[in-house]
Image: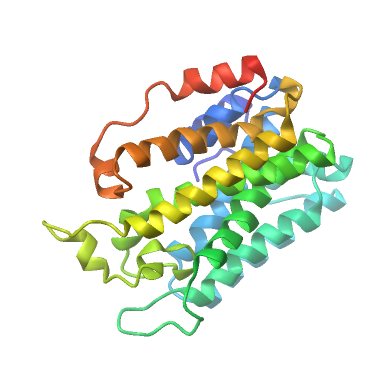
């Protein structure tokens, strides 16, 4: 990540747009005074998420996660930090708007993925994936991040739970949208791979004439995402706009779910078709009407 030692909000949001454009759209509708903290939090999660994809051994990944644990502990204690993201998160940590155990839980969830790295020709040691496991992973990672975002904004407990549901929906849809990316990896992260859930050989999805994607499994994941979206709206009602940013992940998930259904639940068609240029307008409408 190419962040300078002193980061302003514009630089953070620009970095976030490169790595996580959908969440960046939601953050653009957050209170201006909190955008830099929210962007730092989401970029911190991005750094965690990419570790299993870039390290060659679990030990190398654990060293990286140890760095982030130490940096957060320093930030929470008011000690100097070596990275700009924990420096930005230091204020909400010390003020109690971020809870250190919640951020450490995000690290633990990602560190657990290191055991699931698959080397070519080596069978996984974990039990086979199922839909419940995949949904739990989405709730722990995407849902946990959204709950932390809500806490940073000072939302009440009910809205934090609604945000967790919104982040879970966003994560479930993300699993489907990443199917071809995961199929293209030399080593896959089994805990979040629809390829492995479906029991497919990666080459099957990369072939010039691949068979239809596992639509039944994708349909189940989209159904679960839509139930999480409904839970978000049931719990959230019409909250004040200053608390909406993490809840808007439900709006993004709904738009992306509809894209998948229009594509016949086939991520190959989604990858080659146009996106939804009206997503920013859809988010703005949700913000104006206070209806995530």
Position of residue 288 relative to residue 176, above or below, is above
Looking at the image, what colour scheme do you see? rainbow
**The C terminus - image quarter:** top right
Horizontal and vertical percent position of residue 129: 48, 72
Along the viewing direction, whichever of 101 and 36 lies nearer the viewer:
101
Horizontal and vertical percent position of residue 256: 43, 37
Q: How many marks?
A: 0
**Which residue is located at x 53 percent, y 72 percent?**
114
**Which residue is located at x 45 percent, y 74 percent?**
117
Position of residue 18 relative to residue 279, above or below, is below
**Which residue is located at x 80 percent, y 54 percent?**
100
Horizontal and vertical percent position of residue 196: 38, 70
Horizontal and vertical percent position of residue 153: 77, 33
Along the viewing direction, whichever of 192 and 67 lies nearer the viewer:
192
In this orientation, does residue 83 appear?
no
Determine whether, in the image, residue 267 is placed left or right of residue 155: left
Determine whether, in the image, residue 129 is placed left or right of residue 168: left
In this orientation, does residue 99 appear?
yes
Position of residue 166 relative to residue 248, above or below, is below
């Amino acid at each position: 990540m190419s962040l300078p030692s002193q980061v302003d909000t514009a630089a953070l949001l620009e970095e976030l747009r490169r790595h996580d454009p959908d969440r960046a759209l939601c953050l653009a509708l957050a209170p201006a005074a909190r955008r830099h903290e929210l962007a730092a939090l989401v970029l911190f999660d991005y750094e965690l998420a990419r570790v299993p994809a870039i390290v060659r051994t679990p030990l190398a990944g654990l060293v990286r996660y140890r760095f982030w644990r130490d940096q957060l502990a320093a930030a929470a204690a008011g000690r100097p930090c070596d990275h700009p993201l924990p420096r930005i998160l230091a204020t909400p940590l010390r003020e109690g708007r971020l809870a250190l155990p919640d951020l450490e839980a995000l690290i633990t969830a990602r560190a657990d993925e290191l055991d699931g790295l698959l080397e070519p020709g080596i069978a996984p040691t974990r039990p086979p994936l199922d839909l419940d496991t995949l949904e739990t992973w989405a709730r722990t990672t995407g849902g946990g991040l959204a709950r932390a975002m809500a806490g940073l904004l000072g939302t009440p407990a009910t809205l934090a739970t609604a945000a967790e549901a919104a982040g879970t929906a966003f994560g479930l849809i993300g699993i489907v949208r990443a199917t071809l990316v995961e199929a293209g990896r030399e080593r896959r992260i089994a805990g979040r791979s629809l390829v492995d859930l479906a029991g497919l050989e990666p080459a099957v999805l990369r072939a010039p004439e691949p068979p239809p994607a596992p639509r039944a499994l994708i349909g189940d994941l989209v159904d679960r995402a839509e139930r999480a979206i409904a839970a978000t709206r049931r719990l959230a009602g019409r909250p004040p706009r200053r608390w909406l940013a993490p809840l808007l992940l439900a709006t993004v998930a709904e738009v992306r779910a509809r894209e998948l259904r229009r594509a016949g639940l086939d991520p190959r068609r989604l990858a080659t078709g146009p996106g939804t240029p009206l997503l920013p307008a859809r988010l703005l409408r949700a913000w104006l009407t206070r209806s995530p």
